[in-house]
Image (cartoon, rainbow, N blue to C red):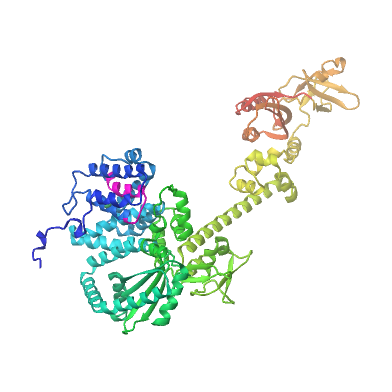
């Protein structure tokens, strides 16, 4: 008994045998033969040793022991050279002298990327450690970080395993905190990846620190049982061996004791008594082929009485983490109960090291991260859930997701069949809707019901193992709604439904905008006496789309809703404005006191008309022209049409005080072509109170100049000068003239 725990000597490496670099080398030399790879691993070791040379672990041993043991665990899993090197280097970037760039330069991008991910995960944990709110998000970020590359997960698990093995050096508080985190975060990952050896050791170590009494109690019970059963077990194994030899079936046999943590779970979380646990001791028979497995099963069942309901065929139906084996429970000749596990060598390898076995290093095969990711996704469909949730950042969302994800991880054990016999695995409690989304997102989005075992059922029906399920879809289905979020149980289905609802909402918003834009266009065009059909025809033209940078009529309406362009601008562009200014002119004229703005010297108020060719206005120098039978037309003196008229010309003058009348003037504007030019010209004129009519615009292709002809209404030549000055201030306009026709 140790009565002074404060002074207890810490055990280096937690009492586990300490490995040297030579041990590691011996191990990886057995399967890594490329001299370059070997050199790289050795260089990584020397680099790490140098970076950690002044550091000690809490237990007092040189720091390098930790990365060395991590690398050793990785080599036991037969990891590749980059993974082992990353294991050796994983803590070096904590040192300010070592950078990722440095590691990249020395050991290549592949190693650097793994070390970089590991360092990021490490820092993230440290910065958030005290805030429980961050926990779920943390976890997810770890997952995401890890999901980039399965090798990051494997190094992280090895790192955690060695830390857990050497936990004695820490304070009891830290021991408990790390053990809890290990159970919350790392063992579920190890389980999901099927790395059983690491999973069970992590679980047992965590339990030892979290529940020391219970751990010890179970350990004692197991030891007692093993001792007690030794003879019985030996007899069982001998008899089975005899029969298999006789039948000439290749095999090797071992016995295994259930892990402390799994017994703990059965006793304390599921309420079984120790004696009710049948598989505390199991006999494992490893053979050559799948066929052999079933043959051996037949022999065992013929020799011993199997316990009903205990047979499980994980060969035909592998667990989601790829585990395959036959399990049966039998009563031996002496009345003891044993579990028998039957599997091939390959299955055994996968049962122990899971993903690590699947991606075990093979000489000469180049690592390809993309290919690996595809492999992982195909083999472990749940990986997609991690990756597809890469969007950020809401804590709430992270928590929801974490909750949904743990559900997926811990309870993935309902197997449902498609009508064609494909097995779809789902978490317990999953519904036909989850099934639909597992088949395909589109099937989920258009699902209306399901046929389960021949009966039509709604989408919230919970599925059981063995159900045959077919999804009913409809093209006119209203699709995902908020209620579906309650029906769906899997994280992936929930994520898809949320996405679909968001999209639907934004579609509705878009439809709204199109409708409003169209209404506003209809109103403006109606004011120009243009009806719906005519308007659609006018707007649905490529030149209109080009002008306003849209691709479709709908987009144009949506743009109109944003007032960019305003409907009037389009009306001007199309040059379809109603000639209502003429009405205005009539009104003005009728308001005249004197319909005759000009008088003829010596002739008084003869009937006169202002010429249309040169559109004279008050202030212009004018001359009268006598037309037989029509009276007198007033021209500007420089109008070419009257230059040589000689004796038919009369001297005329503008009257004074002409009141509010305005007079038409034809003008011509030259400008450099640009979008919005017409709109600017028109808005300048309207801001000066100038009425416009008869707008004609054309582009001179050779020079890309615009020529705009307008009829405007002004009161006199002085006002016209102002208007000209104003127009010349419009960007792009370089010349404004009056026209003589
Ligand atoms: Mn470490």
Q: Quadrant of the N terminus?
A: bottom left
Residue 317 at least partly seen: no
Q: Is residue 4 left or right of residue 552?
A: left
| Secondary structure mostly seen in the magenta stretch | helix
Q: Is residue 362 above or below residue 736?
A: below
Q: Residue 99: image x %, image y %?
A: 30, 40
The quarter of the displayed image where residue 141 is located: bottom left
Q: What's the residue at 20%, 43% (across, down)?
A: 53
Q: Is residue 50 above or below residue 671?
A: below
- Work out which residue is located at the far right of the displayed protein and give it: 629
Q: State the residue in front, 679 or 150.
A: 150
87 in magenta: yes
Q: Residue 131: image x %, image y %?
A: 29, 57
Q: Is residue 642 left or right of residue 446?
A: right
Q: Quadrant of the C terminus?
A: top right
Residue 588 at least partly seen: yes
Q: What's the residue at 31%, 71% (across, down)?
A: 256
Total numbered labels = 0
Q: State the residue in front, 181 or 482.
A: 181
315 in magenta: no
Q: Residue 555: image x %, image y %?
A: 63, 47
Q: State the residue in front, 317 or 141.
A: 317
Q: What's the residue at 35%, 40% (across, down)?
A: 104
Q: Residue 544: image x %, image y %?
A: 68, 41
Q: Is residue 603 left or right of residue 470?
A: right
Q: Is residue 87 above or below residue 685?
A: below
Q: What's the residue at 44%, 53% (across, down)?
A: 390
Q: Which residues are magenta?
A: 76-93
């Amino acid at each position: 008994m140790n009565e002074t725990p404060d002074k207890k000597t810490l055990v280096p490496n937690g009492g586990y045998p300490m490995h040297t670099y030579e041990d590691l080398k011996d191990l990886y030399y057995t399967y890594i033969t490329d001299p370059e790879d070997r050199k790289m691993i050795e260089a990584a070791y020397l680099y790490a040793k140098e970076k950690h040379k002044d550091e000690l672990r809490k237990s007092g041993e040189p720091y390098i022991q930790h990365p060395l043991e991590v690398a050793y665990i990785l080599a036991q899993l037969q990891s590749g050279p980059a993974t082992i090197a990353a294991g050796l280097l994983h803590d070096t970037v904590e040192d300010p002298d070592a950078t990722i760039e440095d590691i990249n330069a020395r050991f290549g991008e592949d190693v650097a990327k793994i070390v970089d991910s590991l360092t990021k995960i490490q820092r993230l944990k440290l910065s958030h450690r005290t805030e429980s709110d961050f926990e779920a998000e943390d976890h997810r970020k770890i997952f995401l970080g890890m999901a980039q590359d399965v090798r990051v997960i494997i190094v992280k698990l090895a790192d955690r395993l060695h830390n857990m093995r050497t936990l004695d050096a820490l304070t009891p508080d830290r021991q408990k905190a790390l053990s809890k985190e290990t159970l919350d975060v790392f063992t579920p990952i190890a389980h999901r990846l099927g790395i059983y050896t690491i999973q069970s050791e992590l679980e047992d170590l965590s339990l030892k620190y979290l529940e020391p009494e219970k751990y010890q109690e179970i350990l004692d019970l197991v030891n007692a049982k093993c001792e007690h059963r030794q003879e019985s077990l030996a007899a069982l194994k001998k008899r089975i061996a005899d029969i298999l030899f006789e039948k000439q079936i290749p095999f090797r046999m071992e016995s295994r004791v259930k892990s402390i943590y799994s017994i703990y779970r059965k006793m304390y979380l599921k309420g079984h008594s120790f004696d009710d646990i049948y598989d505390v001791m199991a006999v494992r028979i490893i053979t050559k082929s799948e066929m052999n497995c079933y043959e051996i099963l037949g022999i065992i069942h013929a020799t011993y009485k199997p316990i009903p309901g205990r047979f499980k065929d994980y060969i035909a139906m592998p667990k989601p983490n790829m585990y395959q084996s036959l399990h049966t429970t039998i009563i031996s000749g002496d009345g003891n109960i044993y579990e028998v596990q039957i599997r091939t060598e390959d299955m055994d390898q996968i049962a122990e090291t899971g993903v690590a076995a699947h991606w075990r290093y093979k000489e000469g095969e180049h690592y390809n991260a993309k290919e690996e990711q595809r492999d992982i996704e195909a083999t472990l469909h749940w990986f997609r859930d991690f990756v597809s949730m890469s969007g950020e950042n809401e804590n709430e969302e992270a928590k929801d997701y974490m909750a949904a994800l743990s559900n997926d991880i811990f309870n993935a054990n309902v197997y449902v069949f498609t009508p064609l016999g494909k097995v779809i695995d789902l978490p317990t409690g999953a519904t036909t809707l989850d099934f639909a989304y597992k088949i395909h997102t589109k099937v989920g989005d258009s699902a209306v019901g399901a046929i389960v075992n021949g009966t039509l059922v709604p989408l919230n029906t919970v599925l059981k193992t063995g159900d045959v399920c077919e999804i009913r879809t409809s093209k006119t289905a209203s699709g995902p709604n908020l209620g579906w979020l309650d029906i769906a149980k899997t994280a992936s289905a929930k994520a898809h439904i949320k996405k679909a609802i968001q999209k639907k909402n934004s579609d509705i918003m878009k439809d709204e905008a199109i409708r409003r834009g169209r209404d506003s266009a209809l109103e403006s065009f109606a004011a120009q006496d243009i009806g719906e059909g005519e308007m659609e025809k006018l707007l649905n033209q490529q030149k209109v789309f080009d002008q306003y940078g849209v691709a479709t009529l709908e987009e144009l309406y949506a743009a109109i809703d944003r007032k960019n362009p305003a409907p009037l601008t389009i009306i001007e562009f199309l040059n379809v404005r109603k000639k209502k200014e003429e009405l205005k002119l009539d009104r003005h004229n009728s308001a005249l006191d004197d319909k005759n703005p000009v008088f003829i010297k010596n002739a008084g108020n003869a009937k006169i008309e202002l010429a249309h060719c040169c559109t004279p206005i008050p202030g212009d120098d004018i001359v009268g022209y006598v037309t037989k039978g029509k009276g007198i037309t007033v021209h500007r003196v420089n109008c070419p049409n009257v230059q040589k008229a000689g004796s038919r010309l009369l001297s005329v003058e503008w009257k004074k005080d002409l009141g509010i009348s305005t007079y038409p003037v034809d003008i011509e504007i030259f400008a450099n072509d640009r979008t919005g030019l017409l709109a600017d010209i028109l808005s300048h004129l309207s801001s000066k109170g100038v009425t416009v009519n008869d707008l004609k615009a054309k582009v001179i292709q050779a020079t890309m100049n615009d020529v705009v002809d307008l009829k405007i209404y002004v009161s006199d030549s002085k006002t016209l000068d102002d208007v000209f000055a104003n127009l010349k201030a419009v960007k792009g306009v370089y010349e404004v003239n009056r026209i003589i026709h």
